Image (tube, rainbow, N blue to C red):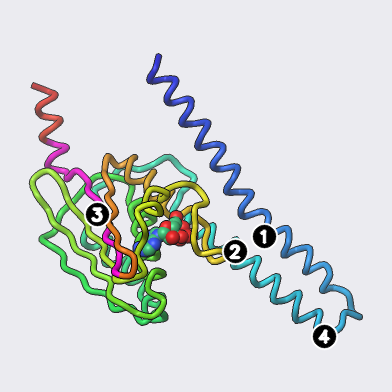
Amino acid sequence: MRQQLIKAEKLKAVEQMGAAISHEIRNPLTAASGFVQLLQDDYLPRQKRKEYLAIVKEELLSAERVIQDYLTFAKPSLESLEEINVKSELRQTINLLQPLANQNSVEIHTDFSIIGFIKGDVQKFRQCFVNILKNAIEAMPNGGRLSVSTEFSQTEVTITVKDTGEGMTSEQITKLGEPFYSTKGKNGTGLGLMVVYSIVRAMNGTIRVQSEVGAGTTVKIKFPTINSLIQEKQIRQH
Ligand code: ADP
Ligand code: MG
């Protein structure tokens, strides 16, 4: 009974979130199309035309950001459960973000242990690390070092993402994962970490954030390995 109640509450929360997010996408699109309509006026002064075009561009970018943080890898279909090659997925995600890193003069270093697998939805895994790595790079607008490393034990994999960026106060750390919490003004959505936290939870993982203002941030994510899942199953079967 209680379990069901929790499930119903969760579903409601997800629905509300979905509504809030479509709002975040629809609002800028509505604004953009309003300005496009104004732009159809043949007698619009040149200066106004430029101004409106800039607004349209900004509004479209804003919708794009929400989609990137929330929907890049989300599929409308049911979640799939597959074996995830942690190392190769992380490499691909890093490649995807290399242009952003170059733009910010961020050097990326990797230290990956032997190949290891976890079980989960690979699209969500990618979304999770795009959001974490993007935050790390965005925390270093004037350059820095981003290190990504993995460690495997019998039972779990630990993925560590470390940046030398602006860091956070402990008060800021407690706010992480709250929907729409962002310190980036119009350049932020405040959805990236909410998505990360919910994916990590869904994959039975844990996430820990350590940070120091002016020094940088370390994010540690742990997931159970396939080995540990097999062992658990065997124990349950006995
Ligand atoms: P957004 O990136 O759109 O602001 P997120 O949910 O991804 O939203 O992140 C929320 C906030 O957490 C950011 O605005 C930033 O203040 C803080 N943050 C997250 N990651 C880092 C990091 N690596 N270094 C410093 N601050 C961070
Ligand atoms: Mg972000």
- Please state the horizontal and vertical placement of residue 210, each as a whole percent of the image: 27, 56
| Residue at x-position 26% and y-position 43% | 205
Q: Quick one: label 3 or label 1, which is nearer the N terminus?
A: 1
- Dot 3: what SS? strand
**What amino acid does circle 1 point to?**
Pro
Looking at the image, which residue sits at the far bottom? 46
Local crowd at mark 2 within 10 Å, few (<14), some, or many (≥20)?
Answer: many
User: Which contiguous range is marked in magenta?
Assistant: 215-230
For image coordinates 49% across by 57% down, the residue present is 182
Helix, strand or loop at disc 1? helix
Q: Name the residue under label 2.
A: 62
| Circle 1 Cα neighbour tier, 10 Å, few/some/many (<14 / 14–19 / ≥20) | many
Q: Distance between the residues labelled 2 and 3?
A: 29 Å
Asked if residue 66 lies left or right of residue 101, the reply is: right
Q: Which residue lies furthest to the top in this view?
A: 1
CA gap, disc 1 and disc 2: 7 Å
**Residue closest to the eye, 150 or 124:** 150
Whether residue 64 sits left or right of residue 223 in the image: it is right
Q: Is residue 226 magenta?
A: yes
Which residue, given by chain and number where applicable, does mark 4 sit on?
46
Q: Quadrant of residue 37?
A: bottom right
Could you give the CA–CA distance between mark 2 and mark 4, rounded to whole angstroms? 25 Å
Q: Name the residue under label 3.
A: 220
Q: Earlier in the sequence, mark 1 or mark 4?
A: 1
Amino acid type for the residue under numbered disc 2: Ser
Q: Earlier in the sequence, mark 1 or mark 2?
A: 1
- Whichever of labels 4 and 3 marks the residue nearer the N terminus, that label is 4
